[in-house]
């Protein structure tokens, strides 16, 4: 089989929304990806998980949201790993499952860039994938770039500017809790799932 270009888009996806999908599609198009894996986090190391929704709910919302795009897939790799989730472990495990010629592209939000020096084995992550930082128009990366230059000078990444969609999972959870509309902020199937499961109430 020919070598594949595979994207990895990690997140808690609590819930997945149109901003996530736009980001994934934009990177998939820009980098001519054959597949893009939505990697649903189990227990991320640098994020408070005390109020995180059940892993199965987050997984199935991703499945519903991506079902109509043949390039998108949802992975259970991190959900089935025991203990804290680390990016380096995911990349290493994926490499054992793929052909040596396959290329990995790791997608991350601009807000996560400053955390990279604190990742487990941060000096090694760049050996396993091309890193793509997705930003919104007007995003200022200067502080993160300065931090990386000082603490992790060999870490290389591309920057892809996304259409301006100011939306977060936290905002959607707040809107649900406040009884506000979330229509069109996430796929219709995911909205129905949130309502039926009474998530974020």
Image: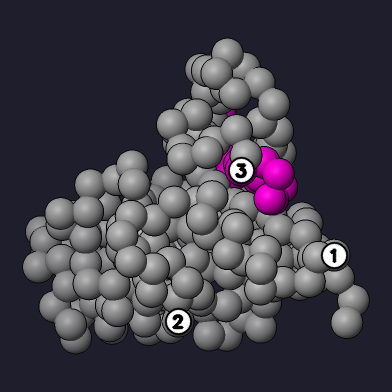
Marks 3 and 2, how far apart in space?
A: 27 Å
Name the one closer to the observer, 69 or 97.
97
Residue 131, given in percent of the width and then of the height, sits at 66, 45
Q: State yes or no: residue 9 in magenta.
A: no
Q: Is the residue marked by circle 3 packed among few (<14), some (14-19), or many (20+) residues within 10 Å?
A: many
The residue to which callout 2 is attached is 63
- Rendered view: 137 above or below 99: above
Residue 21, given in percent of the width and then of the height, sits at 53, 65
* Pointers 3 and 2 in contact (C-beta within 8 Å): no
Residue 104, given in percent of the width and then of the height, sits at 71, 58
State the extent of the magenta-drawn residues as a range: 125-138
The residue to which callout 3 is attached is 125
The residue to which callout 1 is attached is 101
Marks 2 and 1, how far apart in space?
A: 28 Å
Residue drawn at point x = 45 percent, y = 81 percent = 63
Mark 2 vs mark 1, foreground winner is 1
Classify mark 2: helix, strand or loop.
helix
Classify mark 3: helix, strand or loop.
helix
Residue 139 left/right relative to 69: left
- Rendered view: 111 above or below 185: above
Mark 3 vs mark 2, foreground winner is 3
- Rendered view: 71 above or below 19: below
Residue drawn at point x = 54 percent, y = 36 percent = 122
Q: Which tag, 2 or 1, sits closer to the chain's start?
A: 2
Residue 10, given in percent of the width and then of the height, sits at 49, 58
Q: Is the residue marked by circle 2 packed among few (<14), some (14-19), or many (20+) residues within 10 Å?
A: some
Q: Is residue 24 visible?
A: no
Query: Quadrant location of residue 118?
Result: top left
Residue drawn at point x = 66 percent, y = 83 percent = 70
Quadrant containing the N terminus in the rendered view: bottom right
């Amino acid at each position: 089989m020919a070598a594949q270009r595979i994207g990895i888009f990690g997140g808690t996806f609590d819930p997945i929304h149109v901003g996530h999908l736009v980001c994934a599609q934009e990177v998939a198009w820009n980098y001519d990806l054959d597949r893009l894996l939505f990697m649903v986090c189990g227990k991320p190391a640098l994020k408070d998980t005390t109020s995180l929704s059940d892993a199965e709910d987050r997984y199935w919302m991703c499945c519903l949201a991506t079902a109509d795009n043949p390039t998108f897939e949802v992975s259970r790799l991190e959900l089935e790993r025991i203990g804290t989730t680390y990016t380096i472990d995911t990349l290493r495990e994926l490499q054992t499952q793929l052909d040596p010629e396959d290329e990995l592209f790791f997608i991350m939000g601009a807000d996560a860039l400053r955390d990279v020096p604190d990742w487990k084995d941060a000096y090694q992550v760049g050996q396993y994938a091309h890193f793509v930082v997705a930003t919104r128009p007007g995003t200022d990366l200067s502080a993160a770039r300065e931090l990386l230059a000082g603490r992790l000078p060999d870490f290389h990444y591309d920057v892809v500017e996304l259409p301006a969609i100011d939306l977060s999972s936290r905002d959607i959870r707040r809107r649900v809790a406040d009884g506000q509309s979330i229509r069109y902020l996430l796929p219709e199937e995911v909205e129905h799932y949130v309502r039926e499961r009474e998530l974020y109430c």
